[in-house]
């Protein structure tokens, strides 16, 4: 079993990664968390797939388990779901030594984590990520939040989990599009920090294409996506581990997001704004971030901050995984307004994460007005928003 240790100022915790780890968890929980009550937070897709059986195994292992299941979807990452979680914790007399377990994707982890951070000023918190995005990114680093109608992740906390248990086998039940969503954050880690990871994610596909020249790839139809996913599968444990290490190394240097951690926001300033203007029911998080990464790189290339040709590389990498790089039917005025309320904006300035070249992320402070003009200019001169 892979074990990655994350050390932050307040807490040191392990991330365990192993295929089939999930089936061993009731025993592992018995060894480590006996006597604690468990709130099993999951969404309406994941709970029937994994939660029900997990709950009964935990009960067999002697735990008192209270399920807290909410409707799946980003538009449920809100105060109403958070309130529902608080009621369950209060009605079942949870104490600070009991545990909130997040079994699900990034939405489940973010909202369960915020409940754990705030109920009684902090209970135990364990992440069992089930989406690729949650395994490679959101389960690590302690950012927990809910969205407001005014903007994404506007209410949140930094609250590190006690442990993260990752079983790549759970990825099998993701749709190809959900799998692709996780690829967006994985590619992001390659773009900002590791040309090695970027090469692995793009070459694996190119190499196997050379071995199977009759397969038609680089198309976003579902047959191509499944083929690509199959080719990545043998390396997925390693890829998840590499990605966790990249995020761990950044978070350890800047847990509270005042400096280098902002690199992880590559594509997110625009991505979050896209999600917000579509009321969290349009592009998924991974898709919105994909558009954001390409758009910001077109911008910084035009400003001569990024080596020429890198935006094209980003576009090709996104295309491989069926991720979008242009947006449709977005009101640009509303998009700019949403960017202004993003957390990365401070008074009239905003810090953006960009790349000098693949693997080399940088931060840049821009006047919001300047960014606004540049985005308008780019969209006017390109068929970007089709
Ligand atoms: N906290 C952080 O550091 C951080 C980092 C990146 C993203 N995020 C957040 O993560 C969220 C996106 O995460 P996500 O893409 O996992 O969204 P999600 O949790 O909504 O999961 C996507 C879909 O996949 C389903 N699903 C999850 N695991 C499954 C499985 N094994 N089998 C079948 N279906 C499964 C879910 O039910 C959902 O329908 C966003 O809210 C984003 O803001 C947080």
Image (cartoon, helix red, strand yellow):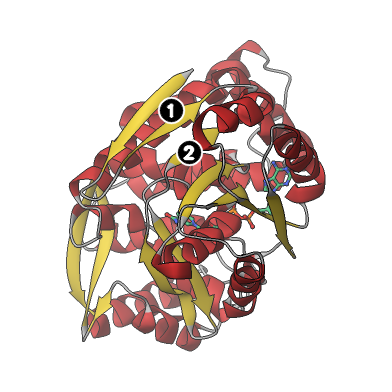
Question: Which residue does the image show at 41% across and 24% down from the upper left?
Answer: 3
First of labels 1, 2 by sequence position = 2
For mark 2, what is the residue?
164
Question: Which residue does the image show at 63% across and 42% down from the upper left?
Answer: 130
Question: Which residue does the image show at 67% across and 72% down from the upper left?
Answer: 281
**Quadrant in the picture for the C terminus:** bottom right
Any part of residue 152 in sight? yes
Report which quarter residue 295 is drawn in: bottom left
Q: Nearer the viewer, residue 344 or 11?
A: 11
Q: Where is residue 54 in the image (x, y as percent from the top left)?
A: 73, 38
Residue 340 lies, with reference to residue 382, above or below; the image says: below
Question: Quick one: SS at disc 1?
Answer: helix
For mark 1, what is the residue?
241
Q: Which of 265 and 146 is in front in this view?
A: 146
* Disc ID at residue 339: none
Question: Quick one: SS at disc 2?
Answer: strand
Any part of residue 295 in sight? no
Report which quarter residue 166 is drawn in: top right
Packing grade of label 1 (10 A; few <14, some 14-19, many >=20) is many
199 sits to left or right of 105: left
Q: Do the residues labelled 1 and 2 touch (CB within 8 Å)?
A: no
Residue 369 lies, with reference to residue 145, above or below; the image says: below
């Amino acid at each position: 079993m892979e074990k990655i240790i994350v050390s932050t100022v307040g807490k040191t915790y392990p991330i365990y990664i192993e295929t089939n780890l999930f089936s061993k968890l009731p025993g592992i929980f018995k060894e480590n968390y006996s006597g604690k009550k468990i709130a099993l937070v999951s969404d309406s897709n994941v709970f029937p797939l994994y939660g029900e059986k997990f709950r009964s195994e935990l009960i067999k292992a002697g735990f008192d388990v209270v399920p807290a299941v909410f409707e799946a979807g980003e538009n449920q990452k809100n105060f109403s779901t958070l309130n529902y979680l608080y009621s369950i914790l209060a009605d079942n007399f949870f104490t600070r030594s009991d545990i909130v377990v997040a079994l699900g994707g990034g939405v489940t982890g973010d909202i369960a984590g915020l409940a754990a951070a705030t109920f009684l000023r902090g209970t135990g918190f364990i992440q069992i990520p089930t989406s690729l995005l949650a395994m490679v990114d959101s389960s690590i680093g302690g950012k927990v939040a809910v969205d407001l109608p005014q903007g994404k992740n506007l209410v949140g906390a930094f609250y590190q989990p006690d442990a993260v248990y990752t079983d790549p086998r759970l990825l099998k039940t993701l749709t190809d599009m959900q799998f692709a969503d996780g690829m967006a954050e994985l590619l992001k880690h390659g773009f900002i920090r590791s040309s090695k990871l970027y090469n692995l994610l793009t070459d694996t596909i190119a190499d196997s294409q050379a071995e199977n020249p009759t397969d038609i790839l680089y198309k976003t139809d579902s047959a191509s996506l499944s083929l690509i996913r199959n080719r990545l599968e043998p390396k997925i444990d390693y890829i998840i581990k590499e990605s966790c290490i990249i995020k761990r190394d950044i978070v350890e240097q800047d847990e509270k997001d005042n400096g280098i951690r902002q690199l992880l926001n590559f594509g997110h300033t625009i991505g979050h704004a896209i999600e917000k203007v579509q009321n969290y029911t349009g592009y998924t998080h991974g898709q919105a971030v994909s558009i954001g990464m390409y758009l910001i790189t077109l911008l910084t290339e035009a400003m001569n901050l990024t080596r020429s040709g890198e935006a094209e590389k980003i576009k090709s990498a996104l295309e491989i995984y069926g991720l979008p790089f242009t947006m449709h039917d977005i009101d640009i005025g509303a998009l700019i307004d949403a960017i202004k309320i993003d957390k990365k904006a401070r008074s009239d300035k905003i810090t953006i994460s960009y790349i000098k070249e693949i693997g080399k992320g940088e931060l840049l402070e821009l006047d919001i007005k300047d960014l606004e003009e540049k985005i308008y200019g780019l969209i006017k001169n390109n068929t970007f928003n089709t």
